[in-house]
Image (tube, coloured by chain):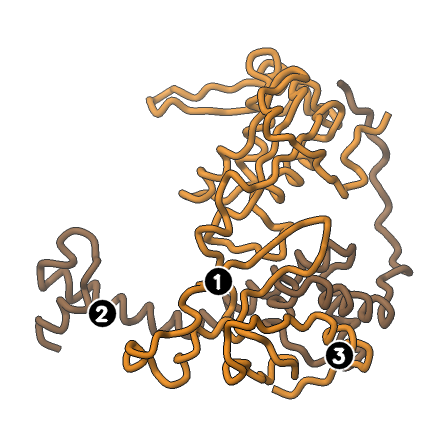
Chain colours: A orange, B brown
Amino acid sequence: MAILCSSSSPSMLAAQRVPPSPAFSTKSIIRTKFLGISFGLTKPIAAVSNRRSFQARCQKDLAVVPLDQRWMFEESEADGPDIWNKTWYPKAADHVNTDKPWYIVDATDKILGRLASTIAIYIRGKNLATYTPSVDMGAFVIVVNAEKVAVSGKKRTQKLYRRHSGRPGGMKVETFNQLQQRIPERIIEHAVRGMLPKGRLGRALFNHLKVYKGPEHPHQAQKPVDLPIRDKRIQKQT
Amino acid sequence: MNKAKVFKLAKGFRGRAKNCIRIARERVEKALQYSYRDRRNKKRDMRSLWIQRINAGTRIHSVNYGNFMHGLMKENIQLNRKVLSELSMHEPLSFKALVDISRNAFPGNKNVVHAPRKVSIPVDV
């Protein structure tokens, strides 16, 4: 693969060279054509970024095959699995629920659809570079003040929420106002559920959304962070 | 192919499709057709996944995928999307360097004229 990098990047990338750990012999350092840089057979460690600490966990103990088992592996695999030419797929330790970030957002005077879209992106994990569609890599999101969410135009009286009980003549219709009087959390839940994937994973993702009516929520122990919103038109125009 | 081969390929199928030859043969034929088609689809799906990952990685630095790739093409950086996605996940500082190179080469669409916004509709609380 012919790689032409501009001159500034090799000097930058050289600074990223992971020093090989002393446990491995020098012959196990592979000079790949990947970036023209030699990688030691260590776990790829995240650079020193204080904003997020991310580690891709590889099979660290399978990296060196014991001598008596080498007959089981092909020549090319003898030094361990090839992590440089295969697309990364998260291991179980990369998406354990207790390590996921928690975000909190106040729904007061935010436009319903724009808010739901941002929430769905964070729950699904599409803001992460490690996004994988088949794995739940997203974060947890808490929404407070759900009864104060805003909609534009005449939707407050004209937007209809429908549900059907399954029996003939069992269609129930409610306006936005009526549903907000009855169960205000359901409005945001309905909006976000429509924006999450439909399927087993989507239903599991929906459980990561926590919506509450007032300003209080029971998740102080998770130390939620403010949800970063980049949509400029999400706040109601007064 | 004979029944033994069919049943070998039908391992893990649901219900009678793994046990009864008439049903298993149909399902195995379908499975082989799907695998033929999906060997070609897999290449497309992987590229799409790389692009989504690169998009997420660049948006952390306030650049979107389109402008990023345009900048890289301008600078004649021929890293492919697979490599770029792996960089964005495992080498964030190197990836930021690439994003900066791309931003210098193509700062983004500053001359875009946005469509006129709708007349501000009164929002009722």
Quickly name the residue at label 2. Answer: B29
Looking at the picture, tell me which residue is in the foreground, A185 or A74: A74
Instruction: Give the percent coordinates (x, y) of residue A222.
Output: 59, 30
- Residue reaching furthest front? A22
User: What residue sits right under mark 1 in the picture?
Assistant: A58
Q: CA distance from mark 2 to mark 1?
A: 37 Å
Label 3, label 1: how far apart the Cα atoms are: 26 Å
Identify the element where label 3 is drawn. Answer: helix
Q: Earlier in the sequence, mark 3 or mark 1?
A: 3
Viewer-side residue, A207 vs A197: A207
Residue A10: assigned label: 3
**Where the C terminus of chain A falls, by quadrant?**
top right
Kindly report which numbered mark, 2 or 1, lies closer to the viewer in this rendering: 1
Task: Give me the residue at 55% from left, 23% from top.
Answer: A186
Q: Position of residue A108 (x, y in %)?
A: 74, 23
Say what amino acid the circle numbered 1 marks.
Cys
For mark 3, does the 10 Å Cα neighbourhood hold few (<14), some (14 to 19), or many (20 or more) residues?
A: some
Measure how far apart labels 3 and 2 are at the Cα level: 51 Å
Q: Residues within 10 Å of mark 1 (few under 14, many from 20)?
A: some
